[in-house]
Image (cartoon, grey):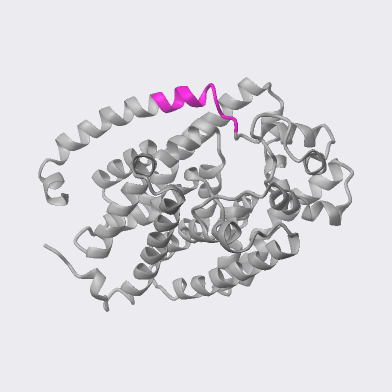
Amino acid sequence: MFTTIEKNKNIFLYFLIIISVISFVNTVSKGLVNGCDFQWQPAVLLWDGINHYQKFILNGKGDFLCQNGEYAHLLHVLYFPFTLFEWETARMLWLIVNIILIFLIPFLICKYFKISKYKTILLSLIFITCYPSRMTLNYGQQSLFVMFFMLLPFIFHNKSSIFFSGVSYVKYSTGYIMFLNFLASKQYKHFILASIPYFIGWMIYFLFTNSDPIINFFEPIELSLKKGYIRDADIFSLINMYFVPAKETTVKITMLLLLFLFNFILLIKINKKEDVFFKMSLIFICPLIFFPHSNYDYVLLFPLLCYSFLNTRYLINKINIYFILYFFYFNRLINHLIDLDSYYQPILLLFLFCLLIINIYSHKNKDNLYFFNYKFY
């Protein structure tokens, strides 16, 4: 496959550009009339002085579309500029932000890690047309926004990037990996610095809504647990679905702590790697394994795809590429075509977990490579 592409790379690239433009225009047109996941209305409530967490906990749901407000305080604080506009305008402006991010993310990754121009264009086209990215634009999700801030400390090694990486904490199911990784890598100062935005957001929220600070601090987590956000493609959800009908809050919290511990041990293993790019790629996979997420969160597989494109001669990199492209383009289609019901996603999760483990143990260091890094010519 890769040899054929290399021989006809220009023709292949022009063809992909045409297809990508058509796909991207179609996605943007859908985003202009959808955007239901953009958390505009909870932010409006905040700046009207209303604690949306209390309101939604009592009501058992949100007030507007699928905007249930189960994100950290900081997100709703940052969304203040959008609250100055009516819904239709705010939705369009958020779509523009996501469009900027969908081009900026592959550019930053490829530029910093010195990926060739041709591969940068190819990877960018993949990123803007893959289903997770298209779904993010369509639904107005926060996945690209969170991913951008997760990238910062791996690309820009300064205090500012570490500080702003804390913005990713707003999405508990994926952003948690940043503070957990700071702890696992013993970067305690980084952990404190990155936590500052979170606490600033919390302080603004409880002061502006005149809420009890202590109660308000835990309300986003309470709302998330009460909502019972469960999918069938992560360990937390599978335990809830098949082993422990964890309706008790204490049981859920115990499960969360155990999964955090397991993830923490895995992060310690990952942080022993020397290659920052490779390390980042594996860290980003962890949220997809441990905690509930939807298809748009699979944008976090993109760094591993970029890393694998650096050297497609290695077997493990070939496996990574094929598997991620499958996730990006064929996952939903195959899920509908084959009759495996609830078994399909757990099987896929098992494969993803095995892929992570194989990647961890297939790279000892740059000079000592295991079997799965065997070169195929």
Q: How many marks?
A: 0
93 sits left or right of 29 in the view: right
Seen at 41% across and 51% down, the residue is 344
Seen at 63% across and 26% down, the residue is 90
Span highlighted in magenta in the image: 26-36
Q: In the image shown, does 309 or 134 lie closer to the viewer?
A: 134
Q: Residue furthest bottom?
A: 368
**From where the camera sits, is residue 216 visible?**
yes
Q: Position of residue 108 (x, y in %)?
A: 42, 48
Image: 278 above or below 32: below
Rendered image quadrant of residue 36: top right
30 sits left or right of 205 in the view: left
Quick one: quadrant of the C terminus?
bottom left
Q: Position of residue 328 (x, y in %)?
A: 36, 44
**From where the camera sits, is residue 160 visible?**
no
Q: Position of residue 198 (x, y in %)?
A: 70, 54
Q: In the image shown, does 98 or 257 lie closer to the viewer?
A: 257
Q: Position of residue 117 (x, y in %)?
A: 26, 45
Seen at 86% across and 53% down, the residue is 213
Rendered image quadrant of residue 185: bottom right
Image: 91 above or below 278: above
Seen at 69% across and 45% down, the residue is 70
* Residue 134 in magenta stretch: no
